[in-house]
């Protein structure tokens, strides 16, 4: 889509939009209503419902896939259009069960809304109904096919946004639409009905169950009650639920969501979260965000004895060890403790990221990475990912990578040591390079080599890169048409004739090509890469680079940070990092972290001599993230507010600070003191906006300011093999939907704390193994992950008390010995 | 009465209709005469005539009019709104309530609550249903909004209790299964109008 601003007229209202934008999006952004059921703002048009029909310059078009042109005149309503739309809604209502009373969508159902909006008051069509069974697709997905109107929104969002492509339309069975309706029914309604009557939604793997990441985005987008969360089925009515806008605290995406609460039951009047909803047109959630909501610290009362012990412990503490699942305010309180009382702050999750970020800031001359995932999603058409396990690390980064392939006709390069079978399915031009752990420098040099503007590159890099190119010859087979003379005997006359024929023949031919040694070093075939890269680069103009957690703890992180800064500067790439955990970016900016713990340690949601815990198992209870207000810093470099969804009766960190003489009246009084010199603003919590505009603009909180400085001129070192690991390797990586102890506490998240391996590797390992590290060992069950490939095994870190960070050290990769138990 | 008339405070100038009550006695002699006249005419017994007649009827003819509440009760109108009843389906005996929650939503006293769940037969089961009669104002909205005619007002108007709030559970209000054959269709508040069939547009069926 070009960036050219144009003006179009919709129903007489002048609207500013961009050239090539879909009319429906342009109308929505300008607050003009066009009914549409099947279209999702950030996905490709499905053209299933056809009710977004409009007239553009006198021609009837579907506004979801008609592109805006300068001066276009659009009419959204006319007598014929309304007639057509009404007929379509009538068709949707044919055989739709009249059980609105029990349906979970009752009250927020788009079928109900549009039926009323378009004034359907009688029915003219009929077809015998087909029995459609209720299916439980997975541990969380419930599909009531009887209610389904086959708008295919679930299919579209799963393919275009989530990337699992776990759903498709399948045959419904049952009778076809009576041909006689072709004469009587309006054209679009008849065509739509024909398709509708033949199809139903089924898992795309041909089985009864979906093999997906269980994100539940399909349940969010479903306009009717067909797709729901299994746990929510028939439990409560939407209108009883109170929507509390909040920020998801599980990973650094910091997605906007609504906790929906109501009294628990007749016997228990306490508020309970029944489900999570999101603004699915603008923000997609992952499974952890949607299903991991019941992690609150329940039934806590003020325990004065424990509180005074906690105050004593803090007075005595030499180190505070904390996880990054905290708010900016809490991080600031801990930093204040460091300033006032000289305690050490230890956070093994964030420390490497903080170092990496400051090294990058030094090299690039700005404190924050240049772009964000929203910009990548909207504008890029070529994404490169280095050092991130895209499927597991961060859902938003993965959605951005996938969305670029689907929506921007993009291409992708995925560098990662753990083979993945999902990433290649994101698009036809996605190339996965499975290199050895530790080769990230080579990968970044390859990025520089492929994308950098050679003219402006520093000479030492240019000559270094030139050293990797060799002109080699290879033999290719070519099809050549060759003339052959054949002797044929005519059967009738017995004469011999000579017939000339053209026969294709394969000829071997030698051609010269550019042999890239960097590609070879990374374990890919340079010959095949030349062709595929050429294909990938066709019509590409906007490039993006996603940088993941592997780089932060890499032994040569300092050099990698310089290379990332170089790539961003010289390749013209939008660059965004993936902060490793929930509020990692906030903690990295606010706290001065220390490398190692020392002496008496107070752990906040982490192991320690005295434990403050929001998990209910510590020495003093703390509120969980859905029980407190405050701000979080997201990977999109925004400071966003979150609100308390549930009541909490105990003490919070601010109370401890008060007891130490450092507290404020409320936790949110700390918000305006967030460090301005790090890019925060001195804004009051209550002044922070929270929401989205009609055109998808995020107006949550405020954007961090990137502090500019003079870029350092230190040279980047050449790629080194010192960090390359061979042999049995374990990778610190969580299964999808698990991020920390809080997701693990949620009752709908089942992924186990186990060793994950590819199917073959898991078979070889057996059921249970002991993994020996340098500093200790873990006994784990083995779980086969069908989407993994290769020999590297994954060990999760979401349980803080297992101290996986201690076992791995800073790097995410470690040489281990795996023994069967 | 217009405002003009209303503001006229000169008593006696308005258009009052005067009753002809005759002259009031003025002197003591006049008052004696009035008492004597009325005593001789036995006017007192004119008034007592009805009393005596009913007394004779009650004592000797067995026509007693007193309702011996609480041993006896008068029939009440079907539109009377007393303690709720939950009806059952006559064919299956299953409760009619589908757990849609409309009564809960519309209740202006916020006294209705229900627990529902997904049961083994893939239906919405109403696992518990309560009305707080300490708060209920018997407005009848719940019965009016009920799409299944499941909750209706019954005739049980005695809801005095020792506590301010007394609850009713689902089974307290449900028609007992052994009395299902006596369950009456509710004609009052919220019931389908007798001419409902005429008002409905028929939907074509392809069978």
Image: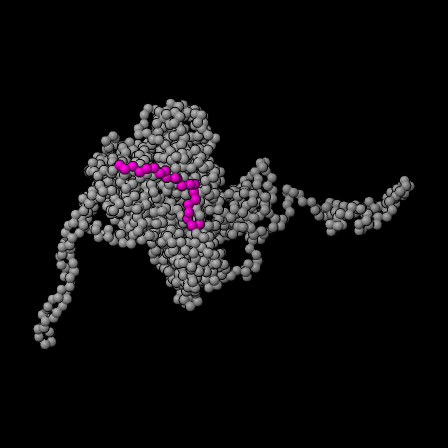
Please count the marks in the image.
0
Residue A709 forms part of the magenta stretch: yes
Image quadrant holding the C terminus of chain B, namely: bottom left
Residue A414 visible: no
Residue at (39%, 58%) from the top-left corner? A69
Residue at (25%, 30%) from the top-left corner? A775
Q: Position of residue A267 (x, y in %)?
A: 48, 38
Residue at (40%, 49%) from the top-left corner? A281
Judging depth in this view, the residue of A178 and A647 nearest the camera is A647
What is the chief secondary structure element of the magenta stretch?
Answer: loop
Q: Position of residue A17 (x, y in %)?
A: 41, 54
Residue A62 visible: yes
Q: Is residue A21 left or right of residue B153?
A: left
Q: Position of residue A376 (x, y in %)?
A: 34, 47
Q: Position of residue A163 (x, y in %)?
A: 32, 49
Query: Given the current orientation, which residue lies at the most extreme bottom position?
Result: A493
Q: Quadrant of residue A18?
A: bottom left
Residue A625 forms part of the magenta stretch: no
Q: Quadrant of residue A417?
A: top left
Magenta span of residues = A694-714
Judging depth in this view, the residue of B16 and A386 nearest the camera is A386
Residue at (43%, 62%) from the top-left corner? A55
Query: Given the current orientation, which residue lies at the most extreme right position?
Result: B29
Q: Is residue B143 left or right of residue A284?
A: right
* Above or below A168: residue A293: above
> Colour scheme in the image?
one colour
């Amino acid at each position: 889509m070009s960036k050219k601003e144009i003006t179009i007229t919709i129903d007489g209202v002048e609207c500013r939009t961009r050239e090539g934008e879909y009319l429906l999006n342009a109308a929505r952004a300008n607050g003009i209503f066009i009914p549409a059921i099947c279209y999702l703002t950030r996905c490709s048009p499905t053209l299933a419902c056809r009710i977004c029909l409009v007239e553009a310059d006198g021609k009837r078009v579907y506004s979801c896939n008609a592109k805006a042109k300068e001066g276009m005149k659009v009419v959204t309503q006319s007598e014929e259009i309304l007639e057509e739309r009404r007929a379509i809604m009538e068709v949707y209502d044919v055989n739709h069960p009249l059980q609105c009373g029990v349906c979970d969508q009752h009250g927020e159902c788009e079928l109900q809304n549009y039926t009323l909006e378009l004034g359907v008051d009688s029915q003219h069509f009929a077809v015998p109904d087909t029995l459609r069974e209720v299916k439980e697709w997975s541990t969380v997905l419930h599909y009531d096919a009887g209610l389904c109107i086959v708008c295919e929104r679930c299919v579209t969002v799963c393919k275009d946004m989530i990337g699992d492509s776990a759903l498709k339309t399948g045959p419904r069975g049952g009778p076809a639409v009576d041909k006689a309706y072709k004469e009587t029914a309006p054209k679009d309604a008849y065509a739509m009905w024909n398709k509708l009557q033949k199809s139903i939604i089924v898992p795309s793997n041909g089985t009864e169950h979906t093999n997906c990441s269980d994100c539940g985005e399909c349940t969010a987008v479903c306009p009717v009650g067909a797709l729901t969360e299994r746990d929510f089925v028939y439990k409560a009515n939407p209108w009883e639920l109170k929507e509390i806008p909040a920020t998801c605290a599980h990973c650094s995406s910091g997605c906007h969501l609504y906790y929906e609460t109501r009294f628990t039951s007749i016997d228990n009047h306490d508020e309970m979260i029944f489900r999570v909803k999101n603004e699915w047109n603008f923000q997609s959630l992952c499974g952890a965000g949607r299903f991991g909501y019941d992690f609150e610290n329940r039934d806590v009362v003020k325990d004065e004895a424990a509180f005074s012990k906690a105050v004593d412990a803090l007075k005595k503490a030499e180190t505070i060890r904390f996880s990054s699942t905290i708010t900016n305010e809490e991080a600031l309180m801990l930093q204040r403790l460091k300033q006032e009382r000289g305690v050490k702050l230890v956070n093994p999750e964030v420390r490497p990221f903080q170092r990496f970020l400051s090294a990058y800031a030094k090299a690039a001359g700005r404190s924050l990475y240049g772009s964000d995932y929203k910009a990548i999603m909207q504008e890029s058409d070529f994404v490169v990912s280095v050092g991130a396990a895209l499927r597991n690390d961060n859902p938003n980064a993965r959605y951005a990578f996938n969305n670029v392939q689907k929506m921007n006709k993009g291409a992708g390069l995925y560098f990662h040591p753990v083979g993945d079978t999902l990433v290649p399915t994101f698009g036809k031009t996605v190339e996965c390079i499975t290199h050895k752990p530790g080769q990230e420098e080579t990968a970044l040099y390859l990025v520089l080599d492929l994308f950098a503007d050679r003219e402006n590159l520093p000479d030492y890099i240019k000559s270094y890169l030139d050293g990797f190119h060799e002109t080699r010859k290879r033999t290719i087979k070519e099809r050549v048409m060759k003339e052959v003379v054949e002797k044929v005997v005519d059967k009738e006359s017995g004469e011999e004739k000579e017939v000339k024929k053209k026969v294709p023949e394969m000829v071997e031919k030698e051609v010269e090509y550019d042999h890239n040694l960097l590609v070879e070093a990374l374990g890919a075939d340079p010959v095949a890469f030349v062709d595929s890269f050429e294909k990938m680069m066709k019509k590409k103009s906007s490039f993006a680079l996603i940088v993941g957690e592997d780089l932060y703890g890499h032994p040569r992180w300092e050099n990698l940070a310089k290379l990332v800064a170089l790539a961003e500067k010289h390749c013209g790439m939008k660059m965004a990092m993936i902060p490793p955990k929930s509020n990692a970016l906030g903690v990295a900016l606010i706290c001065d972290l220390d490398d190692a713990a020392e002496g008496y340690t107070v752990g906040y949601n982490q192991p320690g001599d005295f434990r403050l815990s929001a998990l209910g198992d510590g020495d003093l209870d703390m509120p969980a993230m859905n029980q407190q207000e405050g701000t979080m810093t997201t990977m999109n470099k925004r400071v966003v507010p979150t609100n308390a969804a549930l009541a909490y009766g105990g003490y919070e960190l601010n109370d401890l600070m008060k007891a130490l003489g450092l507290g404020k009246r409320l936790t949110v009084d700390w918000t305006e003191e967030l460090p301005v010199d790090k890019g925060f603003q001195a804004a009051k919590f209550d002044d922070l906006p929270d929401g989205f505009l009609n055109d998808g603009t995020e107006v949550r909180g405020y954007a961090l300011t990137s502090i500019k400085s003079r870029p350092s001129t230190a040279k980047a070192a050449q790629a080194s093999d010192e960090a390359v690991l061979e042999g049995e390797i374990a990778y610190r990586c969580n299964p999808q939907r698990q991020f920390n102890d809080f997701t693990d506490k949620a009752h709908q998240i089942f992924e186990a704390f186990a060793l994950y391996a590819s199917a073959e590797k898991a078979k070889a390992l057996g059921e249970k193994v002991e993994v020996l590290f340098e500093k200790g060992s873990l006994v784990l069950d083995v779980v086969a992950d069908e989407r993994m490939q290769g020999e590297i095994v994954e060990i999760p870190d979401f349980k803080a008390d297992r101290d996986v960070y201690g076992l791995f050290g800073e790097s995410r990769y470690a040489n281990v010995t795996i023994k069967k138990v | 009465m217009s405002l003009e008339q209303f503001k006229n405070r000169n008593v006696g100038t308005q258009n009052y209709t005067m009753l002809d009550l005759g002259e009031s006695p003025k002197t003591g002699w006049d008052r004696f005469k009035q008492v004597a006249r009325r005593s001789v005419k036995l006017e007192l017994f004119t008034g007592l005539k009805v009393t005596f007649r009913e007394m004779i009827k009650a004592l000797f003819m067995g026509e007693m009019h007193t309702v011996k509440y609480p041993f006896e009760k008068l029939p009440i109108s079907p539109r009377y709104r007393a303690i709720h009843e939950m009806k059952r389906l006559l064919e299956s005996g299953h409760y009619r309530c589908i757990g849609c929650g409309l009564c809960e939503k519309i209740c202006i006293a916020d006294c209705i609550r229900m627990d529902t769940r997904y049961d083994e037969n893939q239906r919405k089961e109403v696992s518990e249903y309560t009305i707080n009669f300490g708060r209920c104002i018997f407005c009848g909205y719940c019965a009016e909004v009920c799409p299944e005619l499941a909750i209706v007002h019954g005739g049980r108007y005695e809801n005095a209790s020792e506590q301010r709030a007394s609850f009713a559970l689902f089974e307290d209000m449900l028609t007992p299964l052994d009395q299902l054959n006596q369950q009456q269709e509710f004609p009052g508040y919220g019931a389908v109008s007798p001419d409902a069939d005429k008002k409905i547009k028929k939907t074509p069926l392809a069978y």
